[in-house]
Image: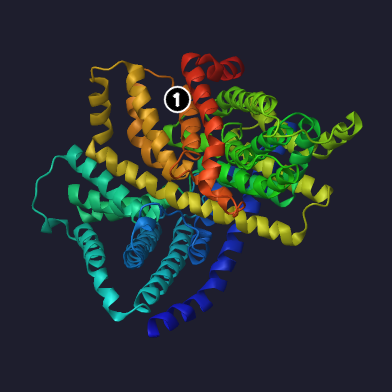
Amino acid sequence: MWVSNSAKNLKKYLKPVCYWSTITGGIALVLMMLLISIDVSLRVFLNAPIRGIIEMVECLLIIVIFSGMAYVEILGEHIKVDVLVDKFPPVAQKTITVSANLLTASIIAILSWQCLHQGQFLITSGYHSGILRIPQWPFALISSFFMMLFALAAFTNFLESLAVLLADGTRDYLWLIPGVFIVVGLLTVSMKPDIITLVIEESTFGIISLLVLFTLIFFRVHVGAAMAMTGLWGMAFLTDSESGLSLLGMVSQTVASNYVWSVAPLFMLMGVLVAASEFSRDLYNAAYKWLGHMRGGLASATLAACAAFAAVVGDSLSGVITMGTIALPEMKKFKYNIKLATGCIAVGGSLGILIPPSLGFIVYGLITEQSIGRLFLAGFLPGVLALISLIIMVYVRCRLNPLLGPAGPKFSIIERIVSVKKSSPVFAMFFLVMGGIWLGFFTPTEAGAIGAFSAIVFGLILRRLNFASFIESLISGIKLTSVIFFIFVYATAFTQYLTVTQLPVVLANFVSGLDLPAYGILSVILFVYLLLGCVMNALPVLILTLPVVFPTVISLGFDPIWFGVLLVILVEIGQITPPIGMSVFALQGVAKDVPMYTVFAGVFPFWIVLIGVIIILIVFPEICLFLPNLMMG
């Protein structure tokens, strides 16, 4: 069939180009890391910072953010939500996928066009950076090229999904008509909004836009593409199509070239380097030798190692998958109850997003303009509290029922000390990064570069990192950056559109006027986040909802740092909450022989403990605020 052959040929020639564009982004990321690290060293030791360092990093950041988007698309790894469509009949699933891919390819092509248009504007305006006077138009054209590759990759996936549909029988394509009609309708209104003569109040249209956004997301449209499409469509309807298109082109450059955002890819690079150097196994071995001899000791060791590893990586799902491959075979060998074994792995990864440095706090801080340093400090004690509470629960359960988790072998004090020594690079990186922030030697953004550089140094010194694994780490870092920033960038566009609708202000005023106590309203908000965390990864949930929710929370008089801690914990609890629970699904990739309901049953006691931790933090907010107030005023 010509559709299938076209998709195969296009993918054959496109994939190598996308791969090498990702390598280009990896080189830019390394340069960014080196520049910041050298600048920090020169400033701290010689009081001679590099002139124009921020401008250089901002230029490199554009390459870092856009370079891997096409490759991630070719691999099918951009964030989509499948929980609703997966329940439909096979034909409906295929037709929805084709329509979603068509819409995704269309909006990405528009984004590429707008990046090109932005480059043309920068050429005519002669805009350049302030100190080094670097012209900005080349970087807009570079982003346009990368987005063009992204659009071609999305079009390839559209052709592949169409070929799958047509292969089942020619009559099935008739089911495409509703989806294609919706796609054409959204694009038509975005370009020609005058065809709709309805007059709708701005805030009401904002609510309609949110419904459209979540509908697109739950019907398999990429999260970033759904936000770009909804922002374009809504802005065109409320103002004009030129304003909507300009918004997309503007945020593509302003967000991607904002120095503050460089903190995220640098911490992501640090995380993948730690994983590539297999420091995760050292962490588990150390926890195993110190805690494994107790009742339930292997489960407790798994919790501690998951928390330590996911804290460095900054993402809970990575911790679940990595530690699942290490810890689950050990617990099976000692005949641990499978519910306890899988439950502690699923929950352990969720602790990592609390213990700094954490991507959850970075995202929250960037969106709400709160101090990332204060958020890091605020999450430390709650993370430790949650970890200790879970370990105590495991110990008590296994004392009451020894068959749940028998004791493992007891190791000598020398063996324990040696195990700590082997995992000391991870602790050294943690104290280097957090100590530098707390002592004021560098900012959280600079800490990401220092952390990534230290991960490379430790990996090379200990011969854990070779050229091949280093390149693979760069590719992984760029892929993860592209996945997250495709959402970040166009969440900004959607947020700016929501500002035009006045919806955040209207909702804040509405909630503030409700005849409910402030903590009653807070409980409703937190419950909604718990539900959202069930069906989506933590970071997209924060990006999607904070522009609307945060003004409301502030209007109620709650501390934004304290609320950030509660929010991050709740979203992570959602990751282990049935019926979805993303961390449980991630664990299924490791424990294929364990039924899903068994894992959820194992998670339940841990879930109860974490809800108890939330209640403690609500009653005693000082647990969150003590360290930030002590160390940062």
Considering depth in this image, is 87 or 355 the residue closer to the camera? 87
For this rendering, which residue is in front, 97 or 478?
97
Image height of 105 relative to 489, above or below: below
* Residue 451 shown left or right of residue 92 in the figure: right
**Is 113 or 15 nearer to us in this picture?**
15
Residue at point 35%, 32% (across, down): 549
Counting every numbered tag in the picture gives: 1
Q: Residue at coordinates 78% horizontally, 48% vertically from top-left?
A: 459
| Location of residue 352 in the rendering, given as x and y in whole percent from the top left corner | 60, 36
Image position, residue 507 (x, y; %):
25, 30
Q: Is residue 451 visible?
A: yes
> Which quadrant would the C terminus be assigned to in this image?
top right
**SS class, disc 1:** helix
Q: Residues within 10 Å of mark 1 (few under 14, many from 20)?
A: many
The answer to which image quadrant residue 194 occupies is bottom left
Identified at 42% across, 45% down, the residue is 535
Whole-percent x, y for residue 155 in the image: 39, 70
Q: Which picture quadrant has residue 153?
A: bottom left
Name the residue tied to disc 1: 563
Amino acid on which the number 1 mark rests in the picture: Phe
User: What residue is at 27 percent from the left and 52 percent from the top?
Assistant: 244
Residue 221 in view, yes or no: no
Query: Quarter of the image holding residue 630?
Result: top right
Above or below, comparing residue 485 to residue 504 in the picture: below
Left or right of 85, for residue 585: right
Location of residue 176 with respect to 490 vertically, above or below: below
